[in-house]
Amino acid sequence: MMDILTHFSQERLFIFRRQSVDKITFLRSSLNDLAWRTRGSVTIEFAIIFPVLVMLALILLDFTTLYANESRLARSGYSLASVFRERTLLYGKDEVVTQSQVDMIYDITNELLSDSQLANKVSLNVQAVYFDSSSTENNKVIDSSKTINITKSSVLAPVFCAPVNDIESDTLTDLSVWSSEVGGTLRWLPVYQITLCIKGDESYFLKAFSYIGVITPSVISSNAVVPR
């Protein structure tokens, strides 16, 4: 009787051990299969997502450069306008804009931008509006015969350069002041407008669009001042 019980116990123990081994083997096989499937899924997702992330990073870098160029263009335009308005100090109280003055301002522009990718790629437009001597404090009369509009185009990247607001528009003529500060005669002071322009395709992303027929607008920065 004892032999039978012993044999039965050993047989049950053997079956239990075998079942345990089979379960462990099945579990290992399942884990290995899951790991293989997971690695395959991660590889596929990485192959899809990584190029998208790279593209987004390049676009972000491209637009960051574009906005930096726009900011530099705006700062340069402001500096040029500040210099150009100093008619008493720098131009001997001569308020008439000449081609040689525009050429000088253009050279200064390229000096200001010499350490950037905008060097020699900027076009310049200078406008000036003067008022007739018959004008009174309550009646501002433009002398169109004296209006100046001179453009100096870039050789490397020529672009049509014109301000958003023309110099004879109300927006700009309203900037004039009734003063005798310059010249000693009470009158409406002239208004000068300095405009810098670059091609809109300085951005590689926007340049790609230009190849499929999309017209990229020029980047324009204008500053209007009165003499002093």
Image (cartoon, helix red, strand yellow):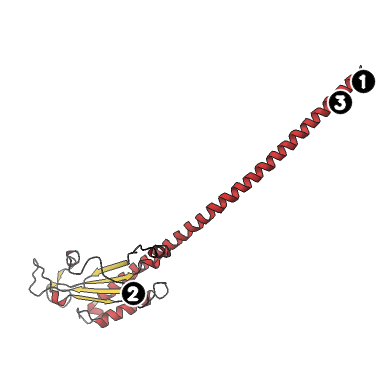
Query: How far apart in space, not on screen, are marks 1 and 3 (Cα)?
Result: 10 Å
Q: Residues within 10 Å of mark 3 (few under 14, many from 20)?
A: few
Question: The residue tagged with tag 2: helix, strand or loop?
Answer: loop
Question: Which residue is denoted by mark 3 in the rendering?
Answer: 10
The residue shown at (75%, 37%) is 25
Question: The residue tagged with tag 3: helix, strand or loop?
Answer: helix
Give the numbered dot on residue 3. Answer: 1
Query: How far apart in space, not on screen, are marks 1 and 2 (Cα)?
Result: 107 Å
Quarter of the image containing the C terminus?
Answer: bottom left
Residue 149 in the image, given as x and y percentages of width and height: 22, 75
Q: Is residue 117 above or below residue 64?
A: below
Question: Mark 1 or mark 3, which has the lower sequence index?
Answer: 1
The amino acid on which the numbered mark 1 sits, given as a three-letter code, is: Asp
The amino acid on which the numbered mark 3 sits, given as a three-letter code, is: Gln
Query: How far apart in space, not on screen, are marks 2 and 3 (Cα)?
Result: 97 Å
- Quarter location, residue 216: bottom left
Direction from residue 118 to residue 93 in the image, left or right:
left
Residue 125 in the image, given as x and y percentages of width and height: 27, 74
Question: Mark 2 or mark 3, which has the lower sequence index?
Answer: 3
Direction from residue 52 to residue 164 in the image, left or right:
left
Relative depth, front residue between 34 and 218: 34
Question: Mark 1 or mark 2, which has the lower sequence index?
Answer: 1
Relative depth, front residue between 75 and 19: 19
Question: Which residue is denoted by mark 2 in the rendering?
Answer: 158
